[in-house]
Image: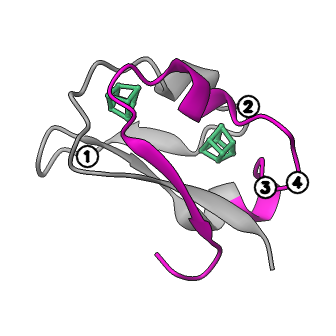
Amino acid sequence: MGYTCRITSECVSCGACEPECPYDCISEDSSNDKYVIDSECCCFDGCGGWSTTPCMEVCPAIAIVRVTCGST
Ligand code: SF4
Ligand code: SF4
């Protein structure tokens, strides 16, 4: 079972994570101005098998957490 990332309510909408995703899985959620990760995109192509996750590394609010695929 792989891992994906999820953005929590701690997100301050700085936008830093969006361009860092190599698979374009991150977008702005127009319903609440936060950013959101498409979990299917992130699980399928994502960084679960990597030792680093680019999105998590740049988040100043520590708002990106790792979760098991299928749990979001
Ligand atoms: S873990 Fe990787 S694939 Fe998933 S959103 Fe972050 S940068 Fe993109
Ligand atoms: S880098 Fe963190 S605070 Fe900035 S938009 Fe992404 S999740 Fe939100």
Q: Amino acid at mark 2?
A: Pro
Secondary element type, mark 3: loop
In this view, the residue in front, 65 or 38, is 65
**Mark 1 nearby-residue class (10 Å; few <14, some 14–19, many ≥20):** few
Tell me residue 33's x, y (percent): 15, 38
As drawn, the label of residue 29 is 1
Q: Amino acid at mark 3?
A: Gly
Q: Which residue is depicted at the point 21% across and 28% down?
A: 12
Which tag, 1 or 4, sits closer to the chain's start? Answer: 1
- Range of residues picked out in magenta: 43-72
Which tag, 1 or 3, sits closer to the chain's start? Answer: 1
Determine which residue is flagged by label 3. 48
| Numbered disc in front, either 1 or 3 | 3
Q: Is residue 29 above or below residue 45?
A: above
Q: Which residue is depicted at the point 49% across and 26% down?
A: 17
| Numbered disc in front, either 2 or 3 | 3
| Numbered disc in front, either 1 or 4 | 4
Give how far apart the Cα atoms at labels 1 and 2 are: 19 Å
Mark 4 vs 2: CB contact within 8 A: no
Whether the residue under disc 3 has CB within 8 Å of ligand 1: yes
Q: Is residue 29 above or below residue 3?
A: above
Secondary element type, mark 1: loop
Tell me residue 64's x, y (percent): 45, 43
Give how far apart the Cα atoms at labels 4 and 2 are: 14 Å
